[in-house]
Image (tube, rainbow, N blue to C red):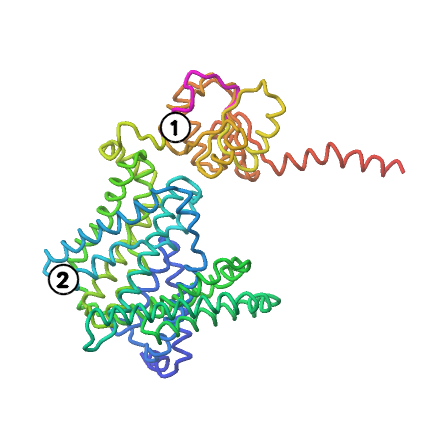
Amino acid sequence: MNWLSIVAENPFYEFSLILLLAVLLGALGQLLRQPLIVIFIALGILVGPSGLDIIKSKANIHLLSDVGIAILLFIVGLKLDLRIIKSVGSIALLTGLGQVIFTSLIGYCIGLAMGFSHLHSFYIAVALTFSSTIIIVKLLSDKKEIDSLHGQIAIGFLIVQDMVVILVMIILSAMRKSGEASLLEDLLKTLLSGLALVGMAVAIMRFVIPYLSLWTAKSQELLSLFAVAWAVSLSSASEMLGFSREVGAFLAGIGLASSEFKDVISSRLTTLRDFLLLFFFVHLGIGLNLQLIGKQLNAAIVFSLFVLIGNPVIVLLIMGLMGYRKRTAFLAGLTVAQISEFSLIFAGLGLSVGHINQETLGLITLVGLVTIGLSTYMILYSHQLYEWLAPLLSIFERKNPYRETLDWVDEHAEYDLIIFGYGRFGGKLIALLEEHPQVRYLCIDFDPFLVRRGRQSGVNIIYGDIEDPDLLMHIPFQTSRCIVNTVADVEIAQQLFTALRQAAYTGKIFQVATNDAHSERFSSCGADRVLVPHSMAAANFYNSVLVDLLTDSSKN
């Protein structure tokens, strides 16, 4: 193992090996469809004392880890959009706060029952409440469900969770202070320090940032450098005033959230964030002692089951009581079946102030590995899980799930045309149909924003998810002459065509495809005709414009 000792003696070699192993394990993680968080923590364990033990420059990795966390919190603040919470009404706030409260209380009681101290139980319980916004957004985006009703509700209450964790970190920062001061004096100092931090940040945001960002925006490289400098500087100022660095970084992000350059900054820093967070999770893995974690295996199983099952059940209960259907509640509930990178940051902060020990940190990390790994598959196969569990989930649905009833659809109405999807193709088709008022159509879309906008424009549109097996029961499709499905997904189309065949539908089925390769697959699924917009546009251009132009040119 001479080569390992050579690597350990040279920080550059050590750094190179970490990156190489990160790529190799990351490729394995992609095959297993696992988030990189799990892979990076495993990498830290592999290169740490419990594995190859090649990490000697821990201070360098710790520094990169701190910068990574600052960039992460900065981007969270930068992307904080309270309009999402407002758009989905009170459900995001009530579900987010309700889940945090109930998970914390139940988790705290489980911790006490398993013999943990009050303080350790508190930290474990709080860590179990937060779910990973980064992972959930990535998974929902990959499944094209980010704009669905359950996707928007999930993003809404995940934002609420992010705000709560920042508040908890502020309180924890205040508890970091030591001394003989009374609680009242400590709270007063914390309040004054907080006001000083916010006042300083607001002054800079108002009188310096607008002009500085406008000047630096002449060069995107300089704009990115300015954003990083602003995030790290306010993070340092926050620590100087007795708060955590994370609070300052988050506040720095909020300071630029209204900037016209926020999207450019966010897109350019996201890659840097992902790169630096590698070192946070590696640093976390290095500090884990597998022997200590082994002693916490039984507790980790109990808490993991609580997160994987208990958190979704809590969301099911809250959303069911608020009048949502069991399917929407179940799909949204699955997004909280794991703990967050913020949970690990929170636990690490607790270790740094001496509130918890390595064993408790290891327990929380192990729960994170288990829940993030398993919940990824739960979300990827959420629709199959729902079909399997649907009969058992009826207890979570009110007799009248009024928030999702389709009572504005006349089940006895007759439509010439049913359109699934109010996107670019569906929207343009409906605009053309408006020129023929005698044609009766009904449009269905799963994006509540689009549905609301369509209704305001006078479009006959309702909310509905094409993947919902019960959707056709509420739509008078039998008398329609044709159905147009603009959702260009083979599996979804197959499910729709199968359901229509089972219902003995006799009309024509038109399916939109994004390319010629999918066209054959849609035809084999049962579509009467496959529409490829790009091919149709090219053919139309050729026949209506180009042929005449080329003919005239040849004559000349």
Q: Is residue 428 left or right of residue 244?
A: right
Q: Which residue is mark 1?
A: 471
Give the class, few, some or many, for how many residues have Cα within 10 Å of label 2's Cα (few <14, many ≥20).
few
Instruction: Name which quarter of the figure residue 334 lies in.
Output: top left
Position of residue 543 relative to residue 262, above or below, is above
Distance (Cα) linking label 1 and label 2: 48 Å
Residue 118 tag number:
2
Furthest residue toward right: 556
In the image, residue 520 lies in the stretch drawn in magenta:
no
The foreground one among 265 and 291 is 265
Give the class, few, some or many, for how many residues have Cα within 10 Å of label 1's Cα (few <14, many ≥20).
few
Residue at (13% x, 62% y) in the render: 118
Residue 121 lies, in percent from the top left, at: 16, 60
Location of the N terminus (image quadrant): bottom left
Residue 90 lies, in percent from the top left, at: 35, 42
Query: What's the residue type where badge 1 is placed?
Result: Leu
Residue 348 lies, in percent from the top left, at: 27, 68
Instruction: Name which quarter of the figure residue 550 lies in.
Output: top right
Residue 85 lies, in percent from the top left, at: 39, 47
| SS of the residue under disc 1 | helix
Frontmost of labels 1 and 2 is 2
Segment tinted magenta in the rendering: 405-418
Query: What's the residue type where badge 2 is placed?
Result: His
